[in-house]
Amino acid sequence: MKILLPILTNLTEKLDAFEQIKPTVSISSVGWQIEHSLKTIDLIITACKKSDPSTYQWKFKLNRFLILDVLQKIPRGKAKAPKVVQPEGEITRESLQLHLEKVHQNLENWENLDRNVYFFHPYFGNLDKKATERFLKLHTLHHLHIIEDILK
């Protein structure tokens, strides 16, 4: 997924600041933001790879249309991360680096997947490959912007 590569590079550049926190921006550290982003990417890519493209069904969802197509931005503070993508345990520079490498491996061959691979998002419903790419880009940029605000 070529659109994520420059964003992942930008996250990599923030690894040394993983302990930084700024409560006026977020109660979560830079490391938490990075780990959450990586967990989200991993979980979604894995779900898409395991999905059966022949069972994908598109259904109009107003929330998805407004966020992914109109605003093209995830509003801050409006949703809580599901438990499954919330970081647990100690976050270190080394654990983040290992997770980044895992994400890069998981993204290999994404381009070869069927266009109807999908995952179910709790607010947006089923997202096919193209919508998944848009979501992952917006979601990761959302957290990258939070990181940048923490570091200001």
Image (cartoon, rainbow, N blue to C red):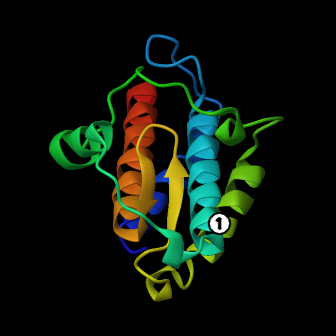
Image location (x, y in percent) of residue 8? 48, 60
At x 59%, y 24%, the residue is 28
Rendered view: 4 above or below 67: below
Rendered view: 148 above or below 103: above
In this rendering, would 117 be left or right of 124? right
- View extreme (right): residue: 89
Depth order, front residue of 33/115: 115
Depth order, front residue of 70/26: 70
- The part of the image, by quadrant, that contains residue 139 is top left
Residue 60 visible in image: yes
Crowding at label 1, few (<14), some or many (≥20) Cα neighbours within 10 Å? some
- The part of the image, by quadrant, that contains residue 58 is bottom left
Image location (x, y in percent) of residue 68? 27, 47
Rendered view: 19 above or below 111: above
In this rendering, would 116 be left or right of 21? left
At x 57%, y 31%, the residue is 81
Rendered view: 100 above or below 28: below
Image location (x, y in percent) of residue 38? 60, 52
Counting the numbered discs, the total is: 1
Residue 16 visible in image: no
* Amino acid type of the residue tagged 1 in the rendering: Thr
Image location (x, y in percent) of residue 95? 77, 52
- View extreme (top): residue: 24
At x 68%, y 35%, the residue is 86
Task: Find numbered disc 1 in the image and state the secondary structure of the residue it sits on.
Answer: helix
- View extreme (bottom): residue: 112
Depth order, front residue of 135/48: 48
What residue does disc 1 label?
46
| Quadrant in which the C terminus appears | top left
